[in-house]
């Protein structure tokens, strides 16, 4: 054999770099390698960085500082599969760092990450790309970017992946995304509930938990509830609740069921399959507070539908709820109270809770937890509204004390609910005294000044129902409760303004309270409200009229009308007509003015200089002799230290004495009217024929009185020559003194008249006949004492020129 000749190795080409093996111990060096064009180096660098990042959060922050993130975002779309995979793995774990997430949002890499979710990519890339998206979706901006780049659909597709980590990351990301309304809408359009339901069969609890949480968010929508029902999702949920081994999923499963119970078809389906009884038994017998709480929430949500309430009542849900009230968990007590409130729409339920439920709710009012107090007060408010029996049951359960204490709660809802219960109780007359005895009015003053409009509204209503007697109104007045009530009239909230007006209308039931309300400016505010089409309401009008009835001078000036129930008292004055919104000057100010050419102010006063009434005619005669001297002194020249009194009117005192002695004893009302009319005419210049009316020089007489009294204010008794409006006012004032019912109406051009209601004389003596009283106009001018039927020709000629 020939000798082998050794073949010489050819040297590498001069333009090729000799291979170099480097062992680096610095992360910074490896990060620099991410810019290499060589795939092998990129792959190994990524692998080393991945291991480094896994060691802890500090290493992730270090990589961020070294600038590793930006080159990695480019490598996730690299042509080489290994480089792409390793880069994606690094980004997946780096995104648990908030600063990394912030940088990735700025670099706008979402499209590149979502591109890794295609079916062609390997499972590892799916796992870490979905992990990256799950981490990014925890913040709002990240969610928006994922959604806008179409990330929802590929994530839904990955729910059927064979890898549990991919499923877990995908469902977690979807759960975060569907917190947004727009994303939930797209979720429905993609019919994505079936693949989510499949995850409930997973052997991994964390996947099942995320699936249930996501369904809990989605099923807040009616359409999704129907989709879940049509996909047999309720069966899955009931099976989970039936399986004791899955008790760690029961809380979330109940949340989904609670949402579905808002859908009537879902309730019927659960009922048909026996699920409703299972649900109630489950809630009643479970020892886990959160499960009981969610069960009660489920009932509460469903019970807002009338048909659902009927079904629940048939299943005796009330027993379950009363049991839950006894739970030691605050959350369960709150949920059960809310469910009872919702069930109050069913009459049968209200009757059940009358004996079982109300005592427990009253005990919860004493809880240290204010949220429990609020929920218990809500249930009691619903139970006692339009239900006197339940209001009595609450009183018997000693609810008044705890309710009054709840009015000082820091929670607006608790205060509003407590005020509602107290209002419902005070509406029952037998209970009102008990409510008042608990110092409720004092406790309501704080809520009246609340910044919350619901609290203001309920507090005002509670005041209105409580101050139905003089003593209660006096207590409210003395404790300073009228000021905040009047202040509520300024509210921009329609309901607050309406309820405040209602309360003021009730408070104006007695003279002292009405006077105080007038002093606080309630009448001015109500007048301002009455001029606004948008702000006025029936109660504001009623309150305004009620207050006007305690200020008849203003009422007559504004409306030109006093009814038979408007009794003229001493100090009344007729200023003449004023326009709405015009201020009426007080009597004292008018008395201190110098005489002018404007219309005289007519005063009614039956009191002496010191404010005491008259009883003896002799005293009046003495005063008559002193009248000219007394009036100027009292009106303009009295010292400011002395108390001011209106000008006395000894003539009017004499008139009152006369009519009381001679007309009051007459038993026939018609005769009283006729005699009084003649008396008034006689004192005011007698009968005046129509053709002589222009010659009746009453203006000169009034001017002389102004000069004599040195004032525009003329006591009515001084007028000896009076026409329509003088006589009509005197007739009304004297009629009121002797109890003859009549109204006073102001007309145009100095006209005024009195209306009386009398039975038609033609019916007198007819056996078995009955006729309603008719309105008659009293003639005080042309034929004093004559009565003219209202609406007739004679009456019209008397009333109008």
Image (cartoon, rainbow, N blue to C red):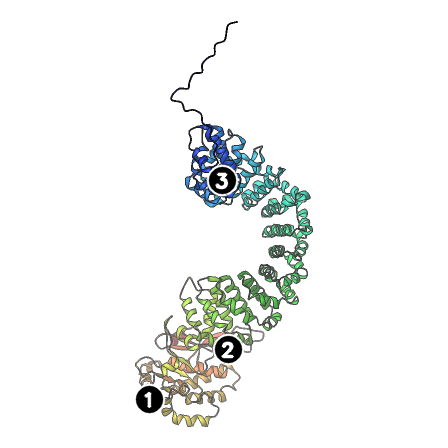
- The numbered dot on residue 222 is none
Residue at the outermost front position? 3
287 or 99, nearer to the observer: 99
Quadrant location, the C terminus: bottom left
Cβ–Cβ under 8 Å for marks 1 and 3:
no
Image vertical order of residue 733 relative to residue 394, above or below: below
Cβ–Cβ under 8 Å for marks 2 and 1:
no
Image vertical order of residue 378 relative to residue 247, above or below: below
Q: Which residue is mark 2?
A: 761
58 or 160, nearer to the observer: 58
Say whether residue 782 is visible. no
Image vertical order of residue 398 relative to residue 562, above or below: above
Where residue 535 appears, x then y in whole percent?
Answer: 43, 63
In three-dimensional space, the C-alpha distance between marks 2 and 1, rounded to whole angstroms, equals 46 Å
Where residue 82 appears, x then y in whole percent?
Answer: 49, 29
Residue at 58% across / 41% down in the picture? 228
Q: Which residue is mark 1?
A: 708
Q: What SS does tag 3 mark?
A: helix
* Neighbour tally class for label 2: few under 14, some 14-19, many 20 plus, Cα within 10 Å: few
Give whichever of discs 2 and 1 has the lower sequence position: 1
Left or right of 418? Residue 549 is left
Where residue 98 appears, x then y in whole percent?
Answer: 48, 45
Residue at the outermost top position? 1
Q: What SS does tag 1 mark?
A: helix
Give whichever of discs 3 and 2 has the lower sequence position: 3
In three-dimensional space, the C-alpha distance between marks 3 and 2, rounded to whole angstroms, equals 105 Å
State the image quarter where residue 600 is shown: bottom left
Q: Which residue is mark 3?
A: 94
In three-dimensional space, the C-alpha distance between marks 1 and 3, rounded to whole angstroms, equals 103 Å
């Amino acid at each position: 054999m020939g000798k082998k000749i050794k073949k010489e190795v050819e040297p590498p080409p001069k333009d090729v770099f000799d291979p170099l093996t480097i062992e680096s111990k610095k992360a910074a060096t490896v990060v620099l390698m991410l810019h290499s064009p060589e795939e092998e180096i990129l792959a190994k660098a990524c692998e080393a960085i991945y291991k480094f990042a896994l060691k802890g959060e500090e290493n992730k922050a270090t990589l961020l500082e070294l600038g590793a993130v930006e080159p990695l975002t480019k490598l996730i779309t690299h042509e080489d599969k290994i480089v792409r995979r390793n880069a994606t793995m690094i980004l997946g774990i780096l995104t648990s760092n908030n600063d990394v997430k912030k940088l990735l949002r700025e670099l706008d890499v979402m499209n590149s990450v979502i591109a890794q979710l295609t079916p062609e990519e390997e499972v590892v890339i799916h796992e870490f790309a979905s992990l990256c998206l799950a981490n990014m979706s925890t913040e709002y901006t990240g969610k928006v970017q994922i959604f806008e780049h179409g990330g929802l659909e590929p994530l839904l597709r990955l729910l059927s992946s064979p890898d549990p980590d991919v499923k877990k990351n995908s469902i977690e990301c979807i759960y975060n995304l569907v917190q947004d309304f727009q994303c939930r809408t797209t979720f429905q359009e993609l019919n994505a509930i079936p693949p989510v339901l499949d995850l409930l069969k997973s052997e991994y609890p964390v996947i099942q938990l995320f699936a249930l949480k996501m369904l809990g968010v989605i099923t807040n929508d009616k359409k999704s509830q129907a989709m879940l029902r049509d996909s047999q999702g309720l069966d899955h949920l009931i099976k989970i609740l039936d399986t004791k081994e899955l008790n760690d999923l029961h809380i979330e499963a109940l949340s989904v069921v609670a949402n579905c119970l808002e859908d009537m078809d879902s309730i019927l389906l659960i009922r048909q399959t026996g699920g409703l009884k299972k649900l109630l038994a489950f809630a009643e017998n479970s020892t886990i507070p959160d499960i009981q709480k969610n069960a009660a929430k489920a009932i509460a949500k469903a019970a807002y539908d009338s048909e659902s309430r009927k079904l629940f009542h048939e299943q005796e849900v009330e027993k379950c709820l009363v049991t839950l009230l006894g739970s030691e968990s605050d959350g369960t007590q709150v949920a059960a109270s809310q469910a009872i409130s919702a069930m109050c729409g069913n009459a049968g339920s209200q009757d059940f809770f009358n004996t079982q439920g109300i005592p427990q709710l009253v005990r919860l009012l004493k809880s240290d937890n204010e949220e429990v107090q609020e929920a218990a007060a809500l249930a009691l408010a619903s139970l006692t509204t339009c239900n006197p029996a339940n209001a009595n049951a609450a009183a018997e359960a000693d609810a008044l004390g705890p309710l009054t204490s709840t009015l000082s709660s820091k929670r607006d809802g608790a205060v509003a609910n407590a005020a509602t219960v107290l209002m419902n109780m005070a509406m029952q007359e037998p209970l009102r005294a008990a409510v008042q005895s608990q110092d409720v009015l004092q406790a309501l003053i704080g809520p009246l000044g609340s910044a919350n409009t619901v609290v203001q509204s309920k507090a005002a209503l509670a005041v209105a129902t409580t101050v139905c007697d003089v003593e209660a109104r006096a207590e409210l007045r003395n404790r300073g409760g009228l000021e905040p009530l009047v202040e509520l009239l300024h509210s921009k909230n329609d309901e607050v303004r309406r309820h405040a007006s209602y309360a003021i209308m009730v408070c104006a039931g007695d003279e002292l309270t009405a006077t105080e309300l007038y002093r606080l400016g309630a009448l001015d505010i109500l007048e301002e409200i009455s001029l606004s089409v948008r702000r006025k309401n029936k109660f504001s009008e009623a309150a305004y009229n009620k207050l006007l009835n305690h200020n008849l001078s203003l009422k007559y000036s504004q409306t030109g009308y006093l009814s038979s129930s408007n009794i003229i008292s001493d100090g009344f004055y007729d200023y003449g007509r004023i326009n709405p919104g015009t201020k009426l000057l007080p009597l004292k100010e008018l008395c201190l003015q110098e005489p002018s050419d404007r219309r005289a102010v007519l005063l009614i006063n039956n009191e002496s200089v010191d404010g005491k009434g008259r009883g003896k005619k002799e005293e009046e005669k003495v005063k008559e002799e002193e009248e000219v001297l007394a009036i100027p002194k009292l009106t303009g020249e009295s010292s400011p230290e002395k108390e001011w009194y209106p000008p006395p009117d000894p003539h009017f005192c004499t008139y009152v004495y006369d009519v009381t002695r001679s007309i009051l004893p007459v038993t026939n009302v018609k005769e009283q009217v006729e005699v009084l009319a003649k008396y008034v005419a006689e004192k005011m210049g007698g009968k005046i024929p129509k053709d002589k009316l222009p010659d009746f020089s009453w203006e000169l007489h009034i001017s002389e009185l102004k000069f004599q009294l040195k004032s525009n204010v003329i006591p009515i008794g001084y007028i000896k020559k009076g026409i329509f409006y003088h006589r009509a006012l005197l007739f009304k004032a004297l009629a009121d003194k002797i109890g003859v019912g009549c109204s006073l109406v102001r007309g145009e051009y100095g006209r005024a008249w009195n209306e009386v209601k009398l039975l038609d004389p033609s019916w007198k003596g007819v056996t078995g006949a009955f006729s309603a009283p008719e309105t008659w106009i009293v003639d005080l001018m042309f034929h004093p004492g004559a009565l003219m039927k209202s609406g007739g020709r004679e009456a019209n000629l008397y009333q109008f020129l």
